[in-house]
Amino acid sequence: MINVAIFGVGLIGGSIALCLKGKPGINVIGFSNRQSSVEKYVQRGVVDVGTTSIKDAAEQADFIFLCVPVGNLQEYMDKLNDCNLKNGCIVTDVGSTKSSVAAFARSLQLNNATFIGGHPMAGSERTGVEAASYHLLENAFYVLTPDESTPPEAVERLTDLLSHTRANIVKLDADAHDDIVGAISHLPHIIAVALVNQVRGYNEGNDLYESLAAGGFRDITRIASGDPTLWRDILIDNRSVLMRLLKDWSLGMNEFVRMLEEKDGSSIEEAFQKAGDFRSRMPERRKGMIHSVYDCYVDVPDHPGIIGKIASELGNNRINLSNLQIIESREDVPGILRLSFRNQEYLDQAIVLLNGLGYSVHQ
């Protein structure tokens, strides 16, 4: 029997647990400091057994997944170092920064165990074990960051275990990981937060900013609503990378200032052209660091009951609608209704259904 201990059975930890639970020869142990959380994990069928004892969870484990916030990783690594871990135990994490935890693990030289950094690059707008899903990691990139001292046999064992998640395993140097993720996830979150706060400041003098900033503005800044404590820890941990990236961003913004000052229309066109070309090469449905949204926009006439009719049609066809929003400001938004779904399958089904009923549907 392979024992897998998961510390922090939330969105990611719970999703990993669901992928492993019930597989022949695998026993999933869930740890939490709170007994009520342990009971919830077991009652929801996410883990086989639960415990509030770190030693009980860690010392019987063949694999340990640290699915706690980045700011708590070193604390839990210290606690594991006080445990009598099994010979050959593999310890991994799921944090979105890798260099610091890898360096800390090397300084500890965990008793009998091998540390391999990990980062499943998938997410959701929801959090907690209630949001955990067997499908969350499917087709997502799952980065592992072994170093030159990591036994290849340990990497192979962890890779084999993670095959149950149906994710695409990628092996990457920890520093390179932090550079890349800093650029494609951490920097965009900073930009979104700064942009929203800039408009928030303007809104203090004229509340039409808030009223008119629906539609496209809301969409491109949705990641500004991330958990403040989580992002505090991530950004501080990856601060050296982000300071460099922000300097590069400032250079890019200064170039736009120059273009506007000089009325350099050709350079503006070129910037948009290059950006459009690069973005068009990105895979549309690949799961990534910034979670996907499954939205479409529907043009509807202003008739009584029309919104209820659309919702009923979706329900009658077993298409799960997760949210519905009436758009008042339609700048950059091609419809009056925004329909949101939990996954791509429901979105695809909804588009086919509504088009077939004669509605104009846009993405």
Image (cartoon, rainbow, N blue to C red):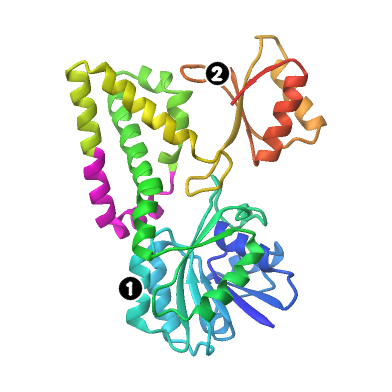
Q: Residues within 10 Å of mark 2 (few under 14, many from 20)?
A: some
The residue lying at 28 percent from left, 28 percent from top is 201
Residue 134 left/right relative to 55? right
The residue lying at 37 percent from left, 71 percent from top is 102
For marks 1 and 2, give the CA distance.
48 Å
Residue 242 is one of the magenta-drawn residues: yes
Q: Can you give x and y, in whole percent of width and height, for residue 72 in the image?
A: 40, 67
Range of residues picked out in magenta: 226-249
The residue under label 2 is 334
The residue lying at 48 percent from left, 49 percent from top is 289
Given residues 303 and 169, the one toward you in this image is 169
Given residues 33 and 315, the one toward you in this image is 315
User: What amino acid type is highlighted by mark number 2?
Assistant: Pro
Question: Where does the N terminus fall, quadrant-wise?
Answer: bottom right
Query: Residue 158, located in which quarter of the rendered image?
Result: bottom right
Query: Residue 26, located in which quarter of the rendered image?
Result: bottom right
